[in-house]
Image: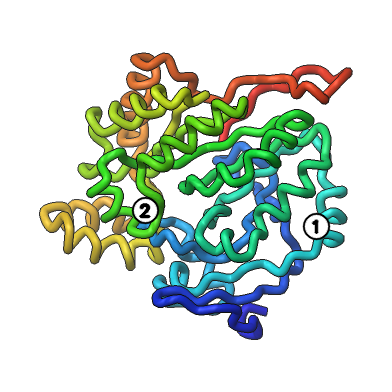
């Protein structure tokens, strides 16, 4: 289907394609994830984050160059009838995560509004559990729909902020919105009465994982009124290494050997590193009195229902 996708538009760096969708909602069986279903309105992501773990997904469409993930963006052809039929098969209490392998608010969304079309459907639902993850302040465009959804469903919005150092962010995430814009977006979401938190992931060894860097992000989250704060270490599959290692060579040459050694046999770092990062995140949360998870709330239009157990992204 990808090979037959017609070219919709091309920019200086990016090509957009129309992708027919056999399904919009995917099943997630990974024990690492707190959700059972995922929705990704696009294939590929323009933000070009050097560490992005999701580059391997373009391989399913026979696109093997790791740069294809950020330069060939596929907008899923919207069919509201098909989407509603899929959604009807999913029990209301099973969590659905939007934006797990590609950002639902990347620049393509300004053109094609696939994410907004999906949210329009959820605005008419009741009793759903939803999570949205993004790096973009474009999410505030949909405050009207998000408020409507949150009145009858449990909705949490996680803003990924890996650093508040704008120079470092521009190196790590060259086409993503500036950290300041993301922080302001969290502030706007919270002021609108929505549950919005900050997710600092990934933590890159010796780059943004220091106590100082984590503290700065947590402080910004608290200042914006974030509902929660979390994060974790980096995950580097071979496809991600193909982009990450040359970037390390260019920007942090003194770390080249360490990264190749650490990730030569495993995409994940060892448990000791994970525990160290978890401890630093915990200390920052305690300092700024930030919860680890989204808080439990009872939607105002969810009458007669038991309050839901909290869940985290």
Q: Kindly check if marks 2 and 1 are in contact, taking CB atoms under 8 A apart as contact.
A: no
Residue at 48% x, 59% y: name it.
Answer: 54
Residue 23 pos. (x, y %): 75, 63
Task: Please state if 83 lies on the left or on the right of 203 as rendered.
Answer: right
In which quadrant will I find the C terminus?
top right
Q: Quadrant of residue 47?
A: bottom left
Of residue 256 and residue 145, the one placed in the foreground of this image is 145
Residue bearing mark 1? 83
Q: Is the residue marked by circle 2 packed among few (<14), some (14-19), or many (20+) residues within 10 Å? A: few
Q: Closer to the observer: label 2 or label 1?
A: 1
Q: Earlier in the sequence, mark 2 or mark 1?
A: 1
Q: Position of residue 154 (x, y in %)?
A: 71, 30
Q: Nearer the viewer, residue 127 or 175?
A: 175
Distance between the Cα atoms at labels 2 and 1?
37 Å
- The quarter of the picture where residue 243 lies is bottom left
Badge 1 local density, few (<14 within 10 Å), some, or many (20+)?
Answer: some
Q: Which residue is drawn at the image coordinates 87% and 48% (left, top)?
A: 88
Front in this rendered view, residue 9 or 205: 9
Residue occupying image coordinates x 72% and y 52%: 118
Q: Position of residue 134 (x, y in %)?
A: 51, 46
Disc 2: which residue: 266
- Quadrant in which the N terminus is drawn: bottom right
Farthest residue in the left direction? 254
- Percent coordinates x, y for residue 20 in the rendering: 71, 73
Q: Is residue 79 left or right of residue 165?
A: right
- The chosen color scheme is rainbow
């Amino acid at each position: 289907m990808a090979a037959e996708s017609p070219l919709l538009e091309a920019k200086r760096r990016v090509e957009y394609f129309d992708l027919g969708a056999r399904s919009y909602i995917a099943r997630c069986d990974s024990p690492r994830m707190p959700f059972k279903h995922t929705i990704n309105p696009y294939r590929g992501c323009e933000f070009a984050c050097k560490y992005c773990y999701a580059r391997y997904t373009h391989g399913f469409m026979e696109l093997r160059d790791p740069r294809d993930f950020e330069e060939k963006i596929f907008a899923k052809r919207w069919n509201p009838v098909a989407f509603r039929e899929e959604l009807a098969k999913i029990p209301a209490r099973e969590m659905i995560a939007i934006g797990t392998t590609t950002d639902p608010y990347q620049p393509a969304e300004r053109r094609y509004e696939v994410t907004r079309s999906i949210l329009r459907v959820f605005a008419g639902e009741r009793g759903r559990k939803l999570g949205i993850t993004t790096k973009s302040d474009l999410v505030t465009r949909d405050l009207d729909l998000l408020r409507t959804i949150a009145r009858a469903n449990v909705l949490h919005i996680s803003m990924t902020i890996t650093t508040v150092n704008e120079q470092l962010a521009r190196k790590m995430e060259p086409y993503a919105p500036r950290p300041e814009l993301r922080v302001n977006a969290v502030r706007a979401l919270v002021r609108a009465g929505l549950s919005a938190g900050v997710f600092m992931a990934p933590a890159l060894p010796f780059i943004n994982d220091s106590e100082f860097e984590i503290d700065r992000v947590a402080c910004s989250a608290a200042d914006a009124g974030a509902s929660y704060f979390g994060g974790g270490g980096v995950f580097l599959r071979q496809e991600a290494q193909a982009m990450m290692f040359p970037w390390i060579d260019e920007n942090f040459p003194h770390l080249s050997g360490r990264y190749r050694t650490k990730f030569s046999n495993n995409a994940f770092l060892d448990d000791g590193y994970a525990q160290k990062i978890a401890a630093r995140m915990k200390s920052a949360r305690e300092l700024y009195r930030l919860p680890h998870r989204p808080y439990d709330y009872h939607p105002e239009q969810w009458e007669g229902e038991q309050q839901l157990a909290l869940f985290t992204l």
